[in-house]
Image: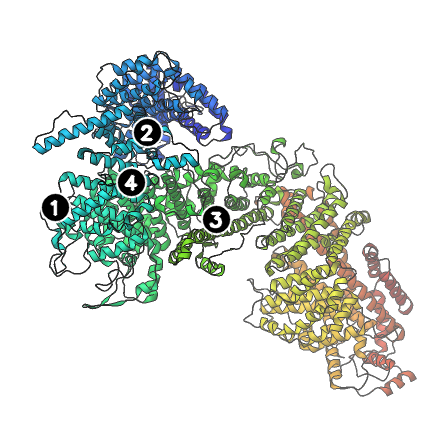
């Protein structure tokens, strides 16, 4: 036989009880089946109730051998051995409980497992607790079943199915003899014997353990008795069971020490009474119940029971027999009146005889003294109802016996009176049955804690009955009439002996609000006798008697006003002890009536004849016994409950000097203080002091009059406070007490007043200013401070009050730790609670009080409460005050104490940083730490359902009124708030201690474990997770969302904070993931729907989602792919999990393990694997979208206040004053403060008219409060919805940006993004959506659009791969489908419709929120940019660099099938945007011109994107027509100042730079069209750029410090000043380049304006062209390339034609232009391609890649760009002036020597390059360039082809190649697919660079060929050497030349000649002036060899393989042909 680690006598019973609780009390709909199964399974346990499995010899032997052979344990694969000590303990348990040995082993194993739940106990002691706990669970389960039975007494409202199951099951148990078994068990269960047995076997531990065992044992016994009681209540026991019960009661002598019945005996007695209860016979609707009554069904029932009741058997407790006889007599009388019963008349005739027997047994005395006065009797509703029914049935059905009792009572009274008068002792055997009956009625109804108001049945005034009968046809029930008659007649002609009992009965019967007026009227009518004396039981008699006593006792006051004499001991005149008792009784009756009903109170006070207040004060000042003074003071207290009476009472109290407030002339003080210190202290009883404190408590309920005592003393409450605090409270522990409980009652009364004063105190600045008052005869004195102010000062100092409060707390802990009976326990507990609350309230007000002290500058010295609490405890010598406070949490039977203690800890932790001190205090020793930790855990482990206030009035209730469950829930909530606050404090903190983190080392190194693992205790974290995990995995979901929603929200929040905290994140997530799988299991139940739970659960969802976002991020970051994948599957699935096979993510191997719980299967389709494999799936909505659906964007608002009596504006102001922000930033109104303010206003209203309208005014107050509650709810709802969307956003963004891309296929990603966008835009576009809620959506839309655009970029790359390998992915816009995978997305028209719909929604959203925050619009602009780029990126040829031009089939396929769709999408986008008209344009343009900087930049970018799409240029026309373009152009000059500041060494913020770049980008886009370029020129863009000063502020950088650097960017985020300048310059040059390109080189005006801009900043451009930067500096090369590009496109001819008069500006312009020309030409030789360049580039290998950029390739490309643009510049100079080679301008000399140089750059110094006649560049440089370009072109071309082949065969690359191209080492842990993706990315980058390099080479070759042809043609055909005779034409030209000026250089631009030809010839002559015949001959000889056929052939090959595929014009071919012809015809070849 295998043992179970969870004891089968404990765990199954606990589960059974939970199942019954769920089915019966919680009424969970899915629990019926579980209930039926549980009952079937445990039926044997119920039949053999509490019968242990017997001991077995073989089992015992097996256990003994378990140390060597072991035992089989369920769930374990092999036998488990146990230690010899374990075996010995198991055998002890077996012998102790006569339990089977295996069961004992199970209990001991369970005890070992549950040791963390019972710190400080051994496993054996825990096993003992589990043994009794299991038995308790079984018995409680049986009691629950019996309670659920249908019957005559109560109903639980269960369904028929459950009722049938339970009824059938319990009937079977009863038939099996359940009652007999229970009674047998009860009879043998003796707690004393049980404890002795346990003590003998050392099975009892500490005092707490012993108390736990005793409580469990007593609960088991009581629950067994309650099972019989519940059965009898619902259905009377049958005859057999009833007789068995009677036999048990015969021998039951279980009485407490005070003579009361023990709870079990009382329960069994009530069982018998309910079995005899026949009140159901009087109900008309109880026919079915009556038919099942055993007394009617069983013919022998009455006879057998009657025989038992009648026979003279001796019972162990005779009173039990008397009660049974009384109940049976009443039953017989009831039975005799029921007509359907036959055959019982003979027995019914004995009813009076049985009653007499009961009276002989003193039944009423026994009921009063042994039954009703029991401790919890009045808290048991059906106990009380049964005794009430027994009494009322007796009075109703046996009136003659009642009359007989009265007559006998009168006779007894006469006898006693006669004996008393004669001085004889009364007879011993006198019967006092009627007196005892009256006392019984008194004790039954004197308490009503359940507010049953049963005493109302006794009142039915006759004058009201007739009225009701006539008008309403209502006749009071017969019983009620009979009871009222009894009350009325019992008071007639009362003898003195019965007077006090009768008054006592009236007092109890008037003890509720409904009965008190009846009693008042009865006594009032008794005094209205016509002509005779008033009845003794009347108000007139009562008050006249009191007045007579006062008259006889009154004495004159001394002239000295000394009232002390009246309290001195003197003879009491005329009042006997019996009279004192009577006076006490009537005073008590009066107090009871006026306490319960205000109308009665006012009527008594306003009766002028009685003068109650004066009479009471007069009697108090007389010499009457202390007990009577106490009653008088209590009566004053009751009168003072009405505020008007209370105010008068204050004045009378002050005038009477009952408590001396004015210094007396005598030395000895008087009044109450004398009574306390001389009389009561000597008697050791303090009734007067207690009563006076009660009066003070009532009077302080109303505001103390501000002028109290004015004129005779310093006005205020000071003397009374001094008495309460210093005389009563501070000395209470040093006085002696007869009754120890009175000590704590006195302390409680005093503390209650002080606490109230402290709570109601409002901190005001006036209280801190000394007020001086003048008193006649005394002088000026300081005015008293408010009592709350004084108390705050005392509590914030080491005062006597503070020490006393802490002493009470210390004493309470000492007493509680003993677990022993405490005298006056109720008062003791209340005193300790009030002491805690004093500390708590002080902490709440401390901050405001201390701040006010500082502001007022008063001299008051204060100490912080936390410092005081950290002080030394004089009783222990340690700083353990806070430990004492925390120990209250370990007593879960004191919920209010726990709540107050928790609040103290919470407030202390919030007020000051004492976390480390707290941790040190709590961990000072191991035992203390374990107890405190367990106490905190127990606070969380309570099982209480939260109760939500239904009305605003419930929110105003004081905490004193809170139920136990509410207090327990509040304690838990404060504990979680304490943990949250502590978690944010430095380590070690209290949260780390309570949650189980390491305290001695960093918390991040903690390894969290389950309780018991590696000695881990049970912590608050385990409790929190248990709360949140309850119900997870079931259909209902987490039960905490139903039962404890507020606690669940705080728990989810705490889990999030733990995961978000740097120190606790890793351990918490690891524990949640590996041990509980918490987040995955919780995620299954999302979204939480309000319809399922009935209240808001969106906050819970928010915290959970935020935690999931962290988990996704961390698992992705740590490459825990399986965990990330599981969460992604749940969130993004669109297929039914049950229908889908388990698929793995791309690149992962199949994983096995423990993660496939709860049906966890992959929900991705086969597209996840990239395979075209059809899977049968059931489509469903993704969980991520369902969660979004649960977030609402609309919110109803309450209506405005419509008030009649109040001014709405003033009310709104008052409401605003009560508002304050929470830590979460939510504005709430303080409802209690608002209610107080409004009620003060109402109470201040005066006038009879307003008094009559008071109900309507109070109605408006209620309306205002309800409105404020609604407003608070709306604000909270808005906050929750914002947080919910924020949480959803975090999860979504982490999913899309942080999770590995290969876990989600591209198609799935695109589909998800589109669905998210569509849902978001639809929700935002809703007309009811609020901007406050929709504003955050913009950021998410931006993220989604960015991801969608990224998807399309990847899709383009994927398509390029699809031609090299099998297609696995289809984009949304592809026409070609791939089987089922494309689905609806394969239809291109549908896809475009989806895009168009998205854009329409998006535009509508953008227009809807155009008036919202600029930040929101900025996000939406960014999203719109990403959207528009989707189509633009696909049309951009830059993304197809890897496509070979010769692959025409592939290129054609891309263009025909893909690009066409994107072009169509672009057109539709434009149409959609244009459809929104001028409003949309105006909004975007307005934001571009003005607004926030980021918004401006994004708006400018949107304009840029839209202009690029707008082929019809409608937006451009709008920009130009509305003046926006002019504004943008004008703003360039306005930005000049900020840009200048930007270029200073101490740089300003970069916003000006980014705005300028965005602006230039837009203007560049405008300039890309001819219309836009013209518009810009008309707006004057170039003059404004020329006017900008910041261009002239180019920073100078040391050349050596920048040597060979690749960038001028700084190491940080802020760029250097040079980099900032280059950003500005580049943007401007690109604009110039766009204008020149759009208008063409023929537009002379554009060229002029551009050159004017360049010349206006000539120094800057001269510096750039001088090129002093390092040769391979990337930024310098890019700068130079842009500059030369602009210059190469400028029209120089326009600059040479200057008409009109020559002025200085034109001369200066020409000078700058000439200088620029020379500098550009000088760059040609520097930027020749050479071997030196190759070496320098190779040296850059170590810095090849920077942030994914190939710096080496970019540098080389920039170098080639400079070369290309310089060559183009030279080609422009050569070609622009002339129409033929005869008139073109020559730039190079005819020498070809440089063409054969090895390195043309090696021998030249390029530090300063000029162009002079002595140094004219030769034509050999051009030939050299041609050779270098042709050679390099082919090598680059071959390299590009090679890389393209590698790209095509990417999957076949070797590991070395993959390592090389991926850039990662072989040791890097990365999947092969990811490595291939990196390699592909690198190859595409290389191919792109190679392609650009080839284009530059081709461009250089074209320009060089043209320059070479022009020069060869000129030199070989048209050139005239200088050593030949000039021709007439040449002479003519020379004569016309003007004198050359000094600034002109050879070959430079001259002053404008008279005509065009002279200018051309002049330039030619300047250059050719040094060309001799020899030079020309040398050229003709050398040219054929230098410009060889091999070179030309190579150029032809380049043309054939590259150039011809890009254009159909054969430009290069024509030039080569012409050069060949020149060489052949005009050279020596």
Report the Cα–Cα distance between label 3 and label 2: 73 Å
Q: Which residue is mark 3?
A: 1060
Q: Residues within 10 Å of mark 2 (few under 14, many from 20)?
A: many
Mark 2 or 1: the one toward you: 2
Mark 3 or 4: the one toward you: 4
> Reading the chain from its start, which is encountered first: label 4 or label 1?
4
Q: Position of residue 1377 (x, y in %)?
A: 75, 40
**Front position in the image: 351 or 1490:** 351
Report the Cα–Cα distance between label 4 and label 1: 44 Å
**Front position in the image: 1883 or 129:** 129
Report the Cα–Cα distance between label 3 and label 1: 65 Å
User: Disc number at residue 682?
Assistant: 1
- Cβ–Cβ under 8 Å for marks 4 and 1: no
Mark 3 or 1: the one toward you: 1
Q: Which residue is mark 2?
A: 482
> Reading the chain from its start, which is encountered first: label 4 or label 2?
2
> Reading the chain from its start, which is encountered first: label 3 or label 1?
1
Q: Position of residue 2026 (x, y in %)?
A: 90, 69
Mark 4 or 1: the one toward you: 4
- Cβ–Cβ under 8 Å for marks 3 and 1: no
Dot 3 falls on a residue whose secondary structure is helix
> Reading the chain from its start, which is encountered first: label 3 or label 2?
2
Position above or below: 940 against 1729: above
Dot 4 falls on a residue whose secondary structure is helix
User: Disc number at residue 525?
Assistant: 4
Which quadrant is home to the N terminus? top left
Q: Residue furthest left?
A: 423
User: Disc number at residue 958?
Assistant: none
**Front position in the image: 500 or 174:** 500
Q: Position of residue 478 (x, y in %)?
A: 36, 28
């Amino acid at each position: 036989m295998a043992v179970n680690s969870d004891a089968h006598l404990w765990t199954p019973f606990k589960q059974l009880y939970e199942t019954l609780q769920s089915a019966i009390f919680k009424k969970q709909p899915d629990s019926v089946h579980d209930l039926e199964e549980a009952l079937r399974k445990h039926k044997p346990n119920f039949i053999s109730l509490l019968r242990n499995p017997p001991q077995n010899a073989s089992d015992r032997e097996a256990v003994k051998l378990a140390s060597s052979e072991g035992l089989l344990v369920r769930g374990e694969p092999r036998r488990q051995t146990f230690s010899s000590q374990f075996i010995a303990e198991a055998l002890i348990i077996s012998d102790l409980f006569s339990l089977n040995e295996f069961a004992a082993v199970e209990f001991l194993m369970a005890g070992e497992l549950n040791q963390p739940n019972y710190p400080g106990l051994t496993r054996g002691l825990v096993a003992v607790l589990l043994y009794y706990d299991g038995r308790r669970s079984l018995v409680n389960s049986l009691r629950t079943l019996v309670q659920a039975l249908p019957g005559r007494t109560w109903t639980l409202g269960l369904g028929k199915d459950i009722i049938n199951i339970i009824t059938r099951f319990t009937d079977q148990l009863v038939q099996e003899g359940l009652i007999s078994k229970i009674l047998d068990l009860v009879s043998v269960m003796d707690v004393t014997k049980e404890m002795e047995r346990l003590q003998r076997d050392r099975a009892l531990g500490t005092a707490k353990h012993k108390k736990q065992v005793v409580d469990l044992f007593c609960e088991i016994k009581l629950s067994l008795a309650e099972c019989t009681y519940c059965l009898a209540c619902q259905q009377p026991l049958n005859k057999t069971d009833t007789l068995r019960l009677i036999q048990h009661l015969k021998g039951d002598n279980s009485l407490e020490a005070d003579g009361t019945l023990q709870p079990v005996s009382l329960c069994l007695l009530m069982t018998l009474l309910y079995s005899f209860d026949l009140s159901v016979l009087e109900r008309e609707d109880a026919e079915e119940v009556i038919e099942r009554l055993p007394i009617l069904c069983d013919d022998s029932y009455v006879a057998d029971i009657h025989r038992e009741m009648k026979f003279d058997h001796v019972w162990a407790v005779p009173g039990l027999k008397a009660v049974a006889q009384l109940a049976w007599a009443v039953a017989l009388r009831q039975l005799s009146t029921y007509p359907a019963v036959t055959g019982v008349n003979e027995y019914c005739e004995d009813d009076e005889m049985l009653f007499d027997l009961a009276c002989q047994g003193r039944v009423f005395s026994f009921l009063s003294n042994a039954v009703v006065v029991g401790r919890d009797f009045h808290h048991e509703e059906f106990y009380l109802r049964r005794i009430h029914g027994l009494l009322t049935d007796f009075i109703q059905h046996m009136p003659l016996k009642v009359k007989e009792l009265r007559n006998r009572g009168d006779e007894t009274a006469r006898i006693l009176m006669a004996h008393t008068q004669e001085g004889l002792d009364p007879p011993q055997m006198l019967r006092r049955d009627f007196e005892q009956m009256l006392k019984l009625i008194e004790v039954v109804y004197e308490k009503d804690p359940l507010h049953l108001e049963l005493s109302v049945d006794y009142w039915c005034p006759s004058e009201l009955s007739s009225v009701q009968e006539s008008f309403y046809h209502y006749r009071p029930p017969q019983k009620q009439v009979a009871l009222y008659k009894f009350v009325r007649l019992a008071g007639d002609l009362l003898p003195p002996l019965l007077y006090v009992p009768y008054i006592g009965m009236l007092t109890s019967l008037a003890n509720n609000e409904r009965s008190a007026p009846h009693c008042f009227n009865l006594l009032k009518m008794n005094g209205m006798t016509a002509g005779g004396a008033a009845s003794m039981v009347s108000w007139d008699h009562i008050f006249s008697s009191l007045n007579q006593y006062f008259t006889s006792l009154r004495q004159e006051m001394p002239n000295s006003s000394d009232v002390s004499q009246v309290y001195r001991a003197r003879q009491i005149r005329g009042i006997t002890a019996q009279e004192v008792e009577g006076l006490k009784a009537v005073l008590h009756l009066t107090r009871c009536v006026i306490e319960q009903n205000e109308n009665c109170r006012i009527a008594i006070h306003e009766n002028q004849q009685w003068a109650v207040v004066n009479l009471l004060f007069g009697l108090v000042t007389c010499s009457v016994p202390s007990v009577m003074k106490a009653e008088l003071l209590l009566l004053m207290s009751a009168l003072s409950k009405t505020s008007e009476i209370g105010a008068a009472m204050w004045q009378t109290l002050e005038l009477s000097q009952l408590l001396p407030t004015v210094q007396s002339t005598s030395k000895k003080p008087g009044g109450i203080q004398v009574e306390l210190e001389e009389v009561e202290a000597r008697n050791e009883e303090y009734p007067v002091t207690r009563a006076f404190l009660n009066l003070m408590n009532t009077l302080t309920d109303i505001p103390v009059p501000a002028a109290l005592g004015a004129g005779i003393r310093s006005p205020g409450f000071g003397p009374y406070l001094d008495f309460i605090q210093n005389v009563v409270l501070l000395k209470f522990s040093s006085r002696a007490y007869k009754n120890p409980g009175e000590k704590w009652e006195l302390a409680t009364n005093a503390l209650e007043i002080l606490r109230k004063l402290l709570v109601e105190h409002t901190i005001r600045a006036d209280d801190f200013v000394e007020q001086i008052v003048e008193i006649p005869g005394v002088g000026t004195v300081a005015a008293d401070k408010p009592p709350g102010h004084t108390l705050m000062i005392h509590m914030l100092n080491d005062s006597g009050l503070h020490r006393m409060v802490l002493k009470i707390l210390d004493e309470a802990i000492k007493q509680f730790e003993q677990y022993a009976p405490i005298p006056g326990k109720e008062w003791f507990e209340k005193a300790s609670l009030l002491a805690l609350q004093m500390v708590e309230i002080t902490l709440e007000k401390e901050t405001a009080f201390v701040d006010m002290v500082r502001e007022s500058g008063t001299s008051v010295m204060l100490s912080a409460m936390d410092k005081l609490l950290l002080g030394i405890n004089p009783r222990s010598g340690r700083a353990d005050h806070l430990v004492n406070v925390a120990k209250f949490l370990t007593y879960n039977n004191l919920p209010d104490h726990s709540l107050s203690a928790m609040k103290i800890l919470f407030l202390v932790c919030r007020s000051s940083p004492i976390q480390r001190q707290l941790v040190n205090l709590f961990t000072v020793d191991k035992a203390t730490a374990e107890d405190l930790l367990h106490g905190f855990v127990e606070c969380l482990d309570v099982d209480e359902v939260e109760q939500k206030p239904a009305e605003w009035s419930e929110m105003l209730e004081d905490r004193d009124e809170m139920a136990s469950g509410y207090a327990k829930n509040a304690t838990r909530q404060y504990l979680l708030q304490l943990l949250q606050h502590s978690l944010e404090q430095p380590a070690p903190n209290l949260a780390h201690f309570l949650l189980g983190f390491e305290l001695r080392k960093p918390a991040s190194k903690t390894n969290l474990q389950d309780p018991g693992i590696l000695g881990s205790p049970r912590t608050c974290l385990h409790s929190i997770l248990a709360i949140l995990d309850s119900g997870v995995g079931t259909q209902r979901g987490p039960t905490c969302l139903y039962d404890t929603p507020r606690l669940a929200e705080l728990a989810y929040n705490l889990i999030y904070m733990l995961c978000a905290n740097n120190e606790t994140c890793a351990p918490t997530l690891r524990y949640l993931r590996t041990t509980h799988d918490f987040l995955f299991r919780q995620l299954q139940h999302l979204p939480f729907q309000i319809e399922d739970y009935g209240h808001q659960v969106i906050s819970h969802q928010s915290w959970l989602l935020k935690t999931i976002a962290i988990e996704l991020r961390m698992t992705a970051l740590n490459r825990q792919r399986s965990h990330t994948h599981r969460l992604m599957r749940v969130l993004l699935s669109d297929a039914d999990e049950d229908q889908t096979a388990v698929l793995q993510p791309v690149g992962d191997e199949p994983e096995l393990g423990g993660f496939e719980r709860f049906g966890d299967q992959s929900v991705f389709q086969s597209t996840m694997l990239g395979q075209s494999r059809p899977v049968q799936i059931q489509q469903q909505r993704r969980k991520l979208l369902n969660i979004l659906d649960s977030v609402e964007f609309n919110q109803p608002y309450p209506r405005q206040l419509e008030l009649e009596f109040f001014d709405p504006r003033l009310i709104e102001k008052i409401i605003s004053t009560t508002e304050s922000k929470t830590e979460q930033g939510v504005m709430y109104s303080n409802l209690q403060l608002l209610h107080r303010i409004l009620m003060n206003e109402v109470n201040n209203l005066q006038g009879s008219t307003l008094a009559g309208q008071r109900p309507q005014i109070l109605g408006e107050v209620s309306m205002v409060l309800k409105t404020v509650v609604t407003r608070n709810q709306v604000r909270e709802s808005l906050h929750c919805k914002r947080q919910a969307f924020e949480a959803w956003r975090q999860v979504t963004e982490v999913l899309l940006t942080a999770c590995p891309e290969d876990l989600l296929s591209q198609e799935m990603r695109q589909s998800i993004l589109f669905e998210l966008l569509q849902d978001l835009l639809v929700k935002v576009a809703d007309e009811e959506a609020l901007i406050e809620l929709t504003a955050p959506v913009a950021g998410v839309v931006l993220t989604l659009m960015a991801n969608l655009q990224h998807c399309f970029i990847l899709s383009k790359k994927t398509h390029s791969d699809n031609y090299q390998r099998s297609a696995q992915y289809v984009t949304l816009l592809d026409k070609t489908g791939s089987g089922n995978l494309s689905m609806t997305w394969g239809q291109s028209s549908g896809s475009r419709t989806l895009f168009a719909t998205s854009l329409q929604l998006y535009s509508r959203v953008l227009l809807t929120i155009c008036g919202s925050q600029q930040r929101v619009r900025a996000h939406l602009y960014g999203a719109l940019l990403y959207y528009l780029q989707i189509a633009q990126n696909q049309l951009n040829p830059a993304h197809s660099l890897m496509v070979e031009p010769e692959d025409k089939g592939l290129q054609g396929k891309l263009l025909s099938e893909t690009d066409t769709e994107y072009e169509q999408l672009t057109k539709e986008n434009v149409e959609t945007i244009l459809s929104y008209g001028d409003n949309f344009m105006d909004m975007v343009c307005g934001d571009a011109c003005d607004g926030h900087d980021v918004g401006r930049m994004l708006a400018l970018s949107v304009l840029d994107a839209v202009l690029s799409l707008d082929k019809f240029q409608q937006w451009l026309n709008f920009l130009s027509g509305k003046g926006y373009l002019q504004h943008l152009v004008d703003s360039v000059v306005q930005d000049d100042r900020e840009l200048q500041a930007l270029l200073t060494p101490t740089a300003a913020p970069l916003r000006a730079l980014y705005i300028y770049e965005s602006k230039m980008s837009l203007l560049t886009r405008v300039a890309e069209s001819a219309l836009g370029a013209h518009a810009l020129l008309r707006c004057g863009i170039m003059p404004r750029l020329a006017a900008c000063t910041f261009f002239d502020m180019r920073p100078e950088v040391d050349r050596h410090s920048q040597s060979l650097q690749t960038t001028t960017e700084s190491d940080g985020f802020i760029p250097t000043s040079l980099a900032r300048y280059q950003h500005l310059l580049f943007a401007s040059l690109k604009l110039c380049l766009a204008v020149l390109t759009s208008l063409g080189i023929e537009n002379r005006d554009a060229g002029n304006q551009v050159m004017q801009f360049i010349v206006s900043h000539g120094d800057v451009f001269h510096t750039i062209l001088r090129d002093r930067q390092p040769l391979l500096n990337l930024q310098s090369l890019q700068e130079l390339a842009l500059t030369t590009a602009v210059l190469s496109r400028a029209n120089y001819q326009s600059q040479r034609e200057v008409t009109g008069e020559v002025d200085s500006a034109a001369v200066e312009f020409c000078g700058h232009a000439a200088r620029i020309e020379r500098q550009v030409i000088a760059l040609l030789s520097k930027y020749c391609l050479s071997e030196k360049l190759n070496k320098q580039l190779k040296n850059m290998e170590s810095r090849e890649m920077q942030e994914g950029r190939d710096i080496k390739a970019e540098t080389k490309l920039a170098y080639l760009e400079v070369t290309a643009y310089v060559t183009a510049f030279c080609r422009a100079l050569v070609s622009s002036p002339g129409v033929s080679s005869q008139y073109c301008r020559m730039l190079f000399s005819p020498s070809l020597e440089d063409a054969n140089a090895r390195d043309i750059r090696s021998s030249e110094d390029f530090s300063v390059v000029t162009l002079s006649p002595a140094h004219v560049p030769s034509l050999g440089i051009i030939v050299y360039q041609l050779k270098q370009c042709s050679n390099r072109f082919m090598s680059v071309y071959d390299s590009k082809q090679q890389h393209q082949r590698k790209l095509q065969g990417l999957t076949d690359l070797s590991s070395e190649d993959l390592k090389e191209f991926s850039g990662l080492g072989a040791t890097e842990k990365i999947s092969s697919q990811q490595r291939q993706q990196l390699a592909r990315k690198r190859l595409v980058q290389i191919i792109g660079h190679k392609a650009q390099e080839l284009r530059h080479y081709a461009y250089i070759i074209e320009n060089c060929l043209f320059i070479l042809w022009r020069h060869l043609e000129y030199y070989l055909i048209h050139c005239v050497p200088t050593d030949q005779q000039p021709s007439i034409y040449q002479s003519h030209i020379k004569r016309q030349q003007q004198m050359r000026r000094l600034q002109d250089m050879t070959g430079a631009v001259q002053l404008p000649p008279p005509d065009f030809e002279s200018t051309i010839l002049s330039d030619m002559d300047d250059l050719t002036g040094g060309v001799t015949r020899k030079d020309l001959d040398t050229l003709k000889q050398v040219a054929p060899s230098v410009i060889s056929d091999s070179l030309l052939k190579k150029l032809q090959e380049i043309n054939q393989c590259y150039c011809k595929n890009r254009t159909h014009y054969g430009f290069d071919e024509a030039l080569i042909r012409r050069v060949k012809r020149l060489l052949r015809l005009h050279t020596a070849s």
